[in-house]
Amino acid sequence: MTRLDRLQQHVSDTGRPVRVALVGAGQMGRGLAAQVGRIPGLDLAVAVDVDAGRAADALAAAGHTTPETDTGRAGEALDAGRGLALTSFAALPELDVDVVVEATGVPEIGARVAETAMGGGKHVVMLNVETDVTVGLALADIARRNGVVYSIADGDEPVCAKELVDFAHELAFDVVCAGKGKNNPFIPTATPASCTAEAERKGMNPKMLASFQDGSKTMIEMAALANATGLPPDVVGMHGVTASVPELTRTLVPVADGGVLSAPGRVDYAFGPAPGVFVVVTSDDATVREEMTYLSMGEGPNFVLYRPFHLASIEAPRTIVTTVLDGTPALQAAHWVAEVVAVAKQDLAPGDVLQGIGGDHVRGMTYPAAEADSLLLLGLAEGATVTRPVRAGEPVPADAVEVVDSTIARLRAVQDAAR
């Protein structure tokens, strides 16, 4: 049976569709809402956003044009298939939904939503990789204790790349490097103001676009892949070579093979093979290498497996389905080999209150975990107060700021204590 066939069987067995609650109805959330509305057996039952209009619009995209807004009538509304539009996620544990999808992109909100939903027995699918790279192990532990699934969503590069890593391992290949392509050069000093015009043309949030341009998003995605697979970054910031897909077998390979890596088994990114994901593999078996060459995969000894697309929120419903049907995550932190550190975009002075990811003050940089112990994590930066000067371009020392007392900071402390 296909996954869709199995979903229809599940609907027949339970007597209702799989009910999805979406938190965050921005660009990513709206895309997911529209796609969920097209898949038989899935129902976007609840949409939550601080902007009530956006929550209603997300439900409309999924086919619900007259949603309820009163949680006191939630049961009636859900049973009638009208949907529920809310401005707070506080009621999620009590609602009769199966999966909560977190799509805000804000680390603190992601941590609150995930902890609240899983504490109420709901599965959580994250489009918010920003939260995961900060407290992914802690959230995975909460999921286990509550008998639910916590997963990063299909369609984002970490999951798509991990699928290739798993495929390579299943075929007994050795993974040399796994990563993603990047199609635009980084602008380390990008801010919402510098991105406003382009963001308006693309229908994006300027802060989100700034996080792409300053490199934070790439650093976050590759750290998530590292912590799921156990493949660490090779150096601070990774190498970020410029290469075509075939050239990856000569660049993102060990120095001994003419490349840039200090050793095989790393995560990295490359300018050129975008918007896809890749895995460079090798085999110590001469017959396998000969067969790969015969199959037009290159001359060896290294070969590249390449997926030339990732469909972001359009693919995310696949994770919703497998979460419910199989009880397994698409991607979840299982190791802790990478951190994303806050690096100053401008000179920071005592008293400055830091904006978060994609803001004016800091950008993200992937570090090997062992090298990041004394540095401020990007996911904890928002709202932190600078207590001593930090020069532009320098990583922000953890003791140069006062971090906000928050859910994500508390979960990070729990995670650190358990390691």
Image (tube, rainbow, N blue to C red):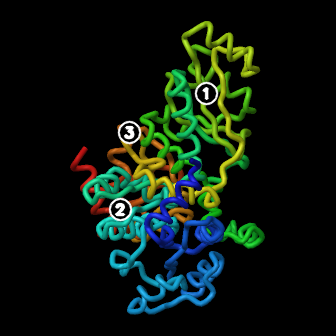
Give the residue number, with chain letter if any, for mark 1. Answer: 280
Secondary structure of the residue carrying numbered label 1: strand
Residue beneath the point at 66% across and 27% down: 304
In this orientation, does residue 192 appear?
A: no
Q: Quadrant of residue 258?
A: top right
Give the residue number, with chain letter if any, for mark 3. Answer: 371
Disc 2 and disc 3 in contact, CB within 8 angstroms: no
Q: Position of residue 389 (x, y in %)?
A: 41, 59
Give the residue number, with chain letter if any, for mark 2. Answer: 401
* Label 2 or label 1, whichever comes before in sequence order: 1
* Separation of marks 3 and 1 at Cα, in angstroms: 25 Å
Observer-side mark, 2 or 1, equals: 1
Residue beneath the point at 63% across and 62% down: 210
| Residue 162, label in figure | none
Disc 3 and disc 1 in contact, CB within 8 angstroms: no
* Separation of marks 2 and 1 at Cα, in angstroms: 40 Å
Q: Position of residue 19 (x, y in %)?
A: 48, 71
* Label 2 or label 3, whichever comes before in sequence order: 3
Q: Position of residue 81 (x, y in %)?
A: 53, 82
Return the residue nearer the eye: 5 or 23.
Answer: 5
